[in-house]
Image: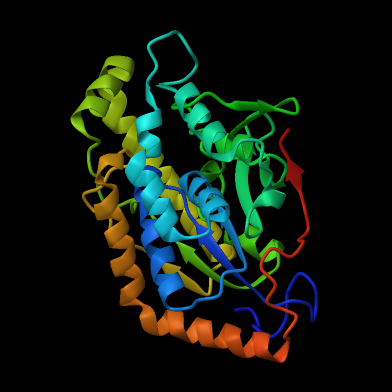
């Protein structure tokens, strides 16, 4: 466990708090509920990292600046409404162009430097198998890459590489938050457990996938859940957060975007269930930052790694 009085990336430099948002499709809407509780409790937020849906929420949070603003945005138009099954012979199950349009309308030409906090996202180079950390450049293409679930969406081509969902290698990127300078990390994991059956996706999605993939749909989905859970467990053992919040999302599928308020409420409940631990970390951060008044600097420059043009 890291010492809150120092920045592991910079010796005795700024003390920073990192919030880590894991992948999980619509289940990732629980992140918004957890963020709402952190805001209410005065928990310091200095940087955020995320992958897949966690990367999307981190980026939108960095743009809008509050959980309430995200709730209002998602209430007006959930990201799931910007996707539909691909009918053309494309290398993707879902048509991604409406979602990309949604992102362009939201972020425009904004870059990571325009966001309110330092944000990091992960993606995977489909050809080399390398994990990429994206911390600069335009935001919209970075979110396209971190959410490009293999087989569901087409890979994102950038810089001669084909990029897919960062959750393939790092479903809850705690290590990225530490590399960006977080001395204390609070992570939220929304993946289904390998030994728990995830909720079946809503009938329209399920029927469409059956038409595309046949009777193997449920087997492939379950196998993917098992692989992701194993990868998550391995990476969290290598780089454990100071606090891991795991909302109870049994009964919710990764495409339950129409149940957003319920999922967000599960995030609120999960955070409130560990308020003593949240307060402990909050007070620890405040004490460390009081000893280093120049340490708490939201938006301060951090080491940059990858850029998507």
Q: Residue at the location (36% across, 77% down)?
A: 274
Residue 247, image x, y percentages: 33, 62
Question: In the picture shown, does residue 92 fall above or below 82?
Answer: above
Residue 199 occupies quadrant = top left
Q: Looking at the image, which residue is at 66% across and 90% down?
A: 290
Instruction: Indicate left or right for 213 with 181 as reference.
Output: left
Residue at image point 27% right, 31% down: 218
Q: Nearer the viewer, residue 45 or 145?
A: 45
**Quadrant in the picture for the N terminus:** bottom right
Residue 90: image x %, image y %?
A: 48, 12
Residue 244 visible? The answer is: yes
Q: Is residue 21 above or below residue 152?
A: below
Work out whether 104 lies above or below 226: above
Residue 256 visible in the current orientation: no
Which of 194/256 is in front? 256
Outermost residue to the top: 89
The quadrant of the rendering that contains the C terminus is top right
Q: Position of residue 283 (x, y in %)?
A: 53, 87
């Amino acid at each position: 466990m890291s010492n809150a009085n120092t920045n592991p990336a910079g010796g005795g430099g700024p003390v920073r708090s990192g919030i880590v948002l894991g992948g999980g499709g619509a289940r990732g809407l629980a992140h918004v509920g957890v963020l709402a509780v952190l805001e209410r409790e005065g928990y310091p937020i200095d940087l955020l990292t995320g992958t897949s849906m966690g990367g999307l929420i981190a980026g939108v949070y960095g743009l809008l600046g509050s959980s309430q603003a995200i709730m209002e945005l998602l209430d007006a138009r959930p990201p799931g409404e910007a996707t539909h099954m691909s009918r053309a012979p494309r290398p993707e199950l879902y048509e991604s162009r409406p979602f990309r349009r949604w992102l362009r309308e939201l972020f425009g030409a904004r870059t990571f430097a325009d966001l309110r906090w330092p944000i990091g996202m992960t993606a995977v180079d489909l050809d080399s198998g390398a994990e990429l950390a994206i911390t600069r450049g335009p935001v919209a293409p970075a979110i396209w890459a971190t959410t490009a679930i293999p087989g569901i969406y087409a890979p994102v081509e950038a810089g001669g590489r084909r990029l897919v969902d960062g959750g393939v290698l790092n479903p809850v990127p705690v290590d990225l938050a530490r590399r960006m300078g977080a001395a204390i990390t609070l992570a939220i994991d929304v993946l289904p457990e390998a030994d728990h059956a995830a909720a079946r996706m809503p009938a329209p999605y399920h029927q469409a996938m059956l038409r595309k993939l046949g009777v193997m749909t449920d087997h492939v989905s379950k196998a993917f859940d098992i692989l992701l859970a194993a990868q998550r467990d391995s990476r969290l053992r290598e780089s454990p957060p100071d606090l891991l919040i795991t909302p109870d999302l049994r009964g919710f599928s990764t495409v339950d975007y129409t149940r957003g308020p319920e999922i967000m409420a599960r995030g609120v409940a999960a955070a409130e269930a560990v308020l003593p631990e949240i307060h402990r970390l909050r007070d620890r951060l405040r004490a460390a930052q009081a000893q280093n008044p120049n340490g708490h600097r939201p938006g301060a420059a951090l080491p940059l790694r990858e850029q998507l043009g």
